Amino acid sequence: ATGATTWSAGTMSGTGNTIINGGGSFNTFGTKFLDRRVVIGGASTVTWTGGQIWFFAANAQIDNNGIFNITHTRNEIMPGAAGRPFNNAGTLTRISDGSTTATISTEFNNTGTVDVQQGTLSFTRSFTQTAGETKPNGANISSNVLMDFQGGSFTGSGNKTGNGNVTVDTNGAQLNPGASTGAISQTNTSSDYTQGTSGEYVVDINAVGDNDLYNVAGAVDLDGTLTVNTN
C-alpha cells in the first residue's frame, strides 16, 4: 500500500505479503488476527494505538523497516504458536504514560533500534539482538525470558525489570549505560547478568567524576572487555 493503511479490527489473511509504504495505524482496542506477513517500509511510520494482535498462520510475522510506535495502554502481540516473529530492523518506539505496559509475546528479533521512552515494554517469549541498540530511555524494559545480546548495544538510562537474565556476548555486543553518563538498573534479584568473552562493558567518566553505572540485583558473571572513556 502506498497510501496510509488503517487496521481497526478483523483478520488480515491471504497469500503473499502486506507491504506498507505509506504509513498508517493499527487502531482501536479490538482484537486483530494476522494470518500473513506484514512488511513496514523504511520510509513509513505505523502507530499502534491499542488492542491485541494475534499471530495465527505459519507465515504470520511483522517485519519493521520503518518506525513502529506503540502508544496507549492495552497493547499486546500474541503468538498462535512458536515461529511467528516480530523482526525489527527499523525503530520500535514505546510512548505512553509512565504506568502502563505494552507486551510483545511473540519471538522478537532486533537489528535496529528499540527506544522505550515512556511506560514499560515487556517481552515474554524471546528477545534476541544481533545488531542495533536497545535503550530504556528513562523508562522500563521488562522481560521474564533471557535478553540475549549477540551484537549491538544495550544502552540508555532506565530499568530492566522482570526475572529474565541478560547476556552480552558474541560479535562485540556492548553494555553501554547512559548517553554520556547514566545508569541502567536490573532490578529483580532473580535476574542475573552474564558478559561472555566477546562482550564489552563501556563506561564513560566525565570531567567532574560522574560515571556510568549498571546496577544488578542478581548475580554477575563478567568476562570479555572493559572499556573506560574519559571526557
Image (spheres, rainbow, N blue to C red):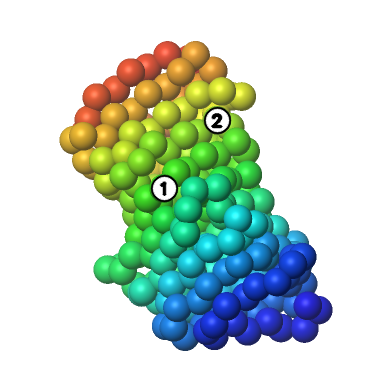
* Residue found 55% across the figure and 39% down from its top: 129
Please state if 42 lies on the left or on the right of 123 as rendered: right
Question: Which image quadrant is residue 211 in?
Answer: top left
Location of residue 144 with respect to 28 vertically, above or below: above
Question: Which image quadrant is residue 101 in?
Answer: bottom left
Q: Nearer the viewer, residue 77 or 165?
A: 77
Instruction: Kindly identify the amino acid type of the residue bearing the numbered disc 1.
Output: Arg
Give the number of the disc on residue 143: none
Q: Position of residue 154 (x, y in %)?
A: 48, 39
Give the number of the disc on residue 150: 2
Label 1 sits on a secondary structure element that is: loop
Extreme right residue here?
A: 2
Instruction: Kindly identify the amino acid type of the residue bearing the numbered disc 2.
Output: Gln
Q: Quadrant of the N terminus?
A: bottom right
Please state if 162 lies on the left or on the right of 34 as rendered: left
Q: Position of residue 30 (x, y in %)?
A: 44, 83
Q: Is residue 176 visible?
A: no
Give the number of the disc on residue 125: 1
Location of residue 150 with respect to 66 vertically, above or below: above
